[in-house]
Amino acid sequence: MAQRIVSVDAGSPAARAGLRAGDELVRIGGEPVIDFLDYQALTARRRVELTVRRNGRERSCVLRKGEYESPGLEFEKSMMSGMRMCCNRCLFCFVDQLPEGVRPSMRLKDDDWRMSLMMGNYVTLTNVSDRELDRIIARHASPLYISVHAADPQLRSHILGQSRGARLMDQLRRLSEGGIEFHTQAVLCPGINDGDALEETLRALTELPGARSLALVPVGLTGHREGLAPLRPYRAEEARAVIAQANRWRERLLSERGTRFVFPADEFYLIAGVEPPADEEYEDYAQIDDGVGLLRLLETEFDEAWRALPERERMPGGGLCMLIGCGVSAAPFLARLMQTHPITGVEVRVIPVENRFFGPSVTVSGLVTGGDLTARLREEPGARVFITECMLRSEGDRFLDDMELGEAEARLGRKIVPVGRRGEDLLEALLGARDELGGR
């Protein structure tokens, strides 16, 4: 596959070798260049032999450069190949249960292991051939993030709606033997892949040296599942059973492997009505992007930043009213955090926002839409509205229902402040708004 060059940096190794825009890169060191991972790996040396095509004729040239110096080439496609799309029909696919009016980009079903390497996206490997698996190992593409769901081949195939799902454990063994590490997740559905099935998954994964962790995530179901598999959300007692099962393994694995390995997502603790584990039990928070430990880390960081304030900044007693809009499940946790950590001159009220867009069973903050947020907060008094930046998924200024941040602010008649997920981010945002509005 030839890669078309669109520009060459002035004074770069490629420019010195005579390459120019319009040339096509055919091979590096005799190897075809499939994508940017090949390009980066094959050019990470001091002497690079290129085969390029110009005006239909191939020619060879040699770049001389620092070992990790960029060759100075820009290509027509940033990934140098198209995105690899999902070929599964998962029982719980979130895309299949989206309502009308959702932002168009949410309907994209990608399943690209390269984005797993770069961005931590979870992939199933059902669209990865044996030859491609060899390339992953050859390119040392580690760590990856892999959706397991179940180790049993037949059960995994059923969950994914894809017969190639049965190959996973063989793929994971090959990756592990090839020195590739991977974090894993299992989206759990009540009565389907929890209980004994989860026990088998845990046994299988903990036998693989390359497996670094397993996140347990409860299935997310919207109110738009007409014609889809009959699934239901977890009940409190079922969530507690999953946590208890995980805890048995966590205690044993900490002794045997020096890691707790299995980490239930925050949502399991919220459903169960159980306090999330202490900060140290999340170890290095390797699964935080999968909703594992977000609340505990937020509390830990907020507490540390709050205690570092002078005592005069930590006085209760009202002041400017500020609102935090969030999902229903996290609201009690955040409300308690605000109550136990007063800020001088600020009264913080946590407002749970019921999700009418996706359905009331969706309770996480990251899926709160602009329409639901503004409808809930329109009559609530408050000088500022604070939200998690996770609600804004498109260039940081658009909610999942395609409402722009500016439109939401216009509906509320006040500023909305997106806040990063770190605890000090929230504290700094509250203090900054107070000082800006003269609330001290």
Image (spheres, rainbow, N blue to C red):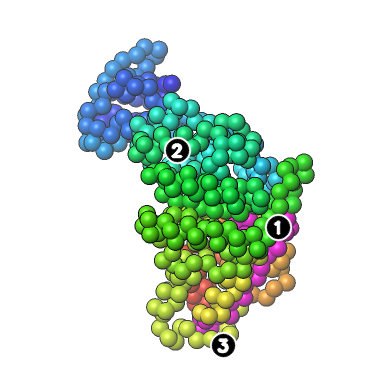
Q: Secondary structure at mark 1?
A: loop
In this figure, which residue is indicated by the disc labeled 3?
317
| Nearer to us: label 3 or label 1 | 1
> Residue 149, percent across and down?
56, 45
Q: CA distance from mark 2 to mark 3?
A: 56 Å
Q: Quadrant of residue 318?
A: bottom right
The residue sitting at the right extreme is 226
First-in-chain label (1 vs 2): 2
In this figure, which residue is indicated by the disc labeled 2?
172
- Disc 2 marks a residue whose amino acid type is Leu
Numbered badge on residue 361: 1
> Residue 337, percent across and down?
54, 75
First-in-chain label (3 vs 1): 3
| Nearer to us: label 2 or label 3 | 2
Q: Which residues are magenta?
A: 342-368
Taking the image as drawn, is residue 381 in sight? Answer: yes
Q: CA distance from mark 3 to mark 1?
A: 36 Å
